[in-house]
Each structure stands twice: as C-alpha cells, then as structure tokens.
Image (cartoon, helix red, strand yellow):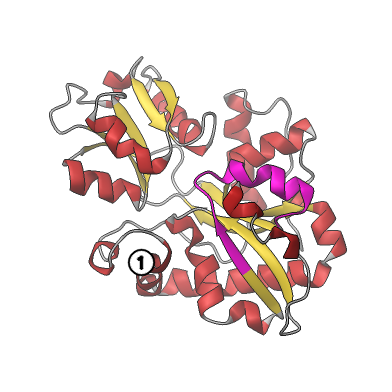
Amino acid sequence: MALILAGCESAGSSSDHGRQELTVAALPLTDSAALYLARDRGLFAKEGLDVRIRPVQQSIQALPALIKGQVSVIASANYVTYLQAYEKGTLDLRILAEGVRIAPHMMDVLVPKDSAVRTPADLAGKKVAVAVLNNIQSLTLNAILDAKGVGRPVYRQILFPQMGPALEQGQVDAVHAVEPFDSAIQGELGARVLLDGDSPPVQGLPASGYVTTRDFVQKHPKAAAGFRRAIEAASKIAARDPGAVRAELPKYTKVTADQAKSLHLPTYPVTADPAQLRRLVRLMRDQGLLKKDVDPAPLLAR
C-alpha cells in the first residue's frame, strides 16, 4: 500500500500542465499493456489527463485506496473480486473499460517437469497456487475441471513473483500462472504445462478491467470518459499490433525484449461487452461466489 499511497493526495487534482491528474494502480501483467500504451502514445494527454501509475502485486491491495478516493482507477482488476465487493456493498463499482479476455496460454497450470501429476484429473486434492483466493484463476480452473468431470484442487494464495520458488521448493503441486510469470516459470524451472487456462468452457472469458467508483464517475465525468476513450484507443492498437504490446512489456515488467517476443498475449477488447461479462457472472453464481445475479450493463460507465 505504501507504493499506492505515496503521491495519492493528487489523485483527481490538476497538474502543472493544466491536465487532470489521475492515480492508477496496476499490476505488472500483460493485462495492463493498454494502460502503458495509452500513457506512452500520448492518448491520455490528448484527453487532458495526466495519469500516474502506481504498481501493486495484487489488485485487491488497492481496493481500500480506491474506496477512499486515494486512487482513481485500478487497472488489471480481476472482475471476480470487485463484483463480490459490489454485491457486499463495500464498493459502488463502475467499470470504465475492459482490460483483457482469456486467450490461449495467457495463463497455464504448470507443474514441475518430473511431477507425477500428468493429467487434469490428477489435480484433485492437490495444492495449486493462485494469486488471490476465490478469484478469476480458481473460478476458471474449477469450471474447466468441472466440465471434464474431475475433482478440484486445494488452492493456496501465493503472489505471482513467488510462484516459481514455491513450485521449485515443493510448497505446492502446481501453479496457475499468468503472463509474463507463466513463461518465466517455464523458462527458469523447465516447468511443464498441464492445462491451458483458455480451455472450455472459459475460452475468451473476460478476466480483468479498469474499475473505479460511481462517486468518481459522478464527480469527474469528463476524466472518466476521457480515460475510457484513451484505454479503448490503446486496446485497439494492442489488438491490431501485438508487436506494440511486446515492445511495451519490458518497460513495466521484468521481462527482456527477447523474452517478450515469445509471451502468449491475452485478447484486448476494444469495447466492453455486457453479454461476455454475464458469462462471468453466471460462472460466479454457479460456484457460489455471488449470491444473486448481478447485471453488469448498468456498471459500465458510459
């Protein structure tokens, strides 16, 4: 939280250049590529915004700051956590733009190369690392395993940077890692891909977005709309030119330019689609992560 709170007093204020300052918390994932593209391509400046990015290791770390108005937006925000907070009444959620949707091998279940876990059925009762409990990783993996008619694992919360060491030291039997950590663990440990996180029935499922509060949207409608337009413009660049994403990744992650060339990228949707988000809501309902249906359409800031 120290990374977030440093300088957060300026969130939503005006900069020396006459542009409105926004503080955005973001994870060092491929999910955040449009945010950095928008900054580096001048798309935020074009909208009269001065966006300051604060790195976090879990998007949930920034939730208290978002609620207090110390952070304007959370990027790479996994929808599951924020829809749950909305249902509980702890967050008056608004979604400014979609972040990414799941694509082939953007996240994988990895096991040690000599592991006795050979098939998805072998995961039953085994320890699997996820970044946050009851989030998009466990939700999607449960759905995949349920569709195969096999048992579920036991989840352990381990931050992405610590997943490789945890797997190597035998603290867990498998990790559900996202890029760029997915490829890094494979490269450094020789870990084996047991399961593609983009398997049926979760193929193309919305995974993360750019979230804020209703209060922010109401108080700063121009900034909210400008931020959305900038992200959507950047997502359009990312969708048509994966090379632009690969060039951006070394600037905010620990991957090298050579490593970025081989990463499996997610899908960057140009506009938010309520129908796709309803797929996510239905899965959450099926697994008991939501007690009632939540219509995502009214939550999209437009």
- With respect to residue 79, does 144 lie above or below? above
Task: State the image coordinates of residue 107 (x, y, percent, origin top left).
Answer: 37, 45
Q: What residue type is disc 1 on?
A: Pro
196 on left or right of 218: left
Task: Say whether residue 68 is magenta.
Answer: yes
Task: State the image coordinates of residue 17 (x, y, percent, origin top left).
Answer: 71, 85
Outermost residue toward the top in this view: 125
Outermost residue toward the left in this view: 114
Residue 15 or residue 148, whichever sits in front: 15
Residue carrying label 1: 250
Q: Residue 155, located in which quarter of the rendered image?
A: top left
User: Which segment did they paint magenta?
Assistant: 52-71
Task: State the image coordinates of residue 233 (x, y, percent, origin top left).
Answer: 58, 75
Q: Residue 123, located in which quarter of the rendered image?
A: top left
**The C terminus is located in which quarter?**
bottom right
Task: State the image coordinates of residue 75 (x, y, percent, origin top left).
Answer: 59, 56
Crowd band around label 1 with a 10 angstrom C-alpha radius: few (<14), some (14–19), many (20+): some
Q: How many marks?
A: 1
Q: Which residue is at a point 28% across and 24% down the rendered structure image?
A: 173
Residue 182 or residue 1, whichever sits in front: 1
